[in-house]
Amino acid sequence: MSRRSGKSWLWVLLTFIAVGLQVWRDIQDGPEASPKPASKVFEVILGARIHDHPDNDGDSFHLDHNGQTHEFRLYFADCPEKRRHPFNGDRIAEQGQYFGGLSEAETVYIGQQAKSFALSLLSAQSFTIYTKWQGVYNSGRYYAFIVFTDGEDLSAKLIRAGLARIHTSGTTLPDGRSVSDYQKQLRGLEQFARVQQMGAWRKHR
């Protein structure tokens, strides 16, 4: 066998392995839903359950419903990153600055707390998803409100706990409240978290 033929077979083998790994990963993660067209009105999703996935964090979650898995991103709230990787250093710095100058390690720690907080609620309580299937750039995620039986959505709970900043896309709420009215409410919750030194607003060591 020539040297060139050997290299060709090596590329075929590597391609086969890569495809096989992707198929195996897809099987492990479960069936992903087909892309959804954006809507002007909210779709109401009942009975969804959290799907265990390594990319779940404080404000983005894989949720199972009717045999498919969708990934949703909260409106209005942005939690700190849960880990550092080569491409998110600037974002972590921006998030830490928002909370009064947290270090990178402190910011990531808050992101980990936010993930635990959110996943604990989603695992223990019933919730309703409201989504217009508005895509988050080209990430495969969709913006949504996640509302619990007490009537409060997860974005508000995270901000009250000092685990998220008021940031990212917003929209008129399912109950008809405007963006400006809801932002005013969230600023009140954020002020509460500051005064009570909750989460990221705790006095820095």
Image (cartoon, rainbow, N blue to C red):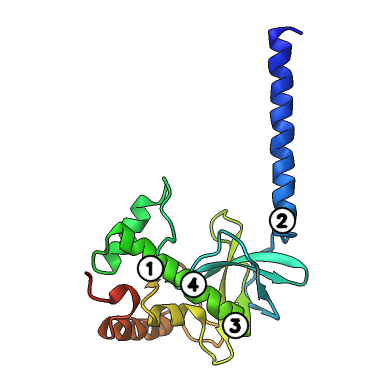
The percent coordinates of residue 57 (x first, y second) are 51, 65
Question: Given the image, on which type of amino acid does mark 3 rest?
Answer: Ala
Residue at 72% over, 61% down: 33
- In which quadrant of the rendered image does the C terminus lie? bottom left
Secondary structure under tag 4 reads helix
Secondary structure under tag 1 reads helix
Figure label count: 4
Q: Are marks 2 and 3 in contact (CB under 8 Å)?
A: no
The reply, left or right, for residue 155 in relation to residue 37 is: left
The percent coordinates of residue 85 (x first, y second) are 43, 49
Q: Kindly report the distance in space between the C-alpha atoms of the residues bearing marks 2 and 3.
A: 24 Å
Residue 116, numbered label: 4
Q: Which residue is mark 3?
A: 124
Q: Kindly report the distance in space between the C-alpha atoms of the residues bearing marks 1 and 4.
A: 10 Å
The percent coordinates of residue 140 (x first, y second) are 61, 57
Question: Given the image, on which type of amino acid does mark 1 rest?
Answer: Ile
- Extreme residue in the bottom direction: 150
Q: Which residue is mark 1?
A: 110
Residue 70: image quadrant is: bottom right
Residue 30, numbered label: none
Q: Between 172 and 130, which is closer to the camera in this rendering?
A: 130
Q: Between 18 and 46, which is closer to the camera in this rendering?
A: 18
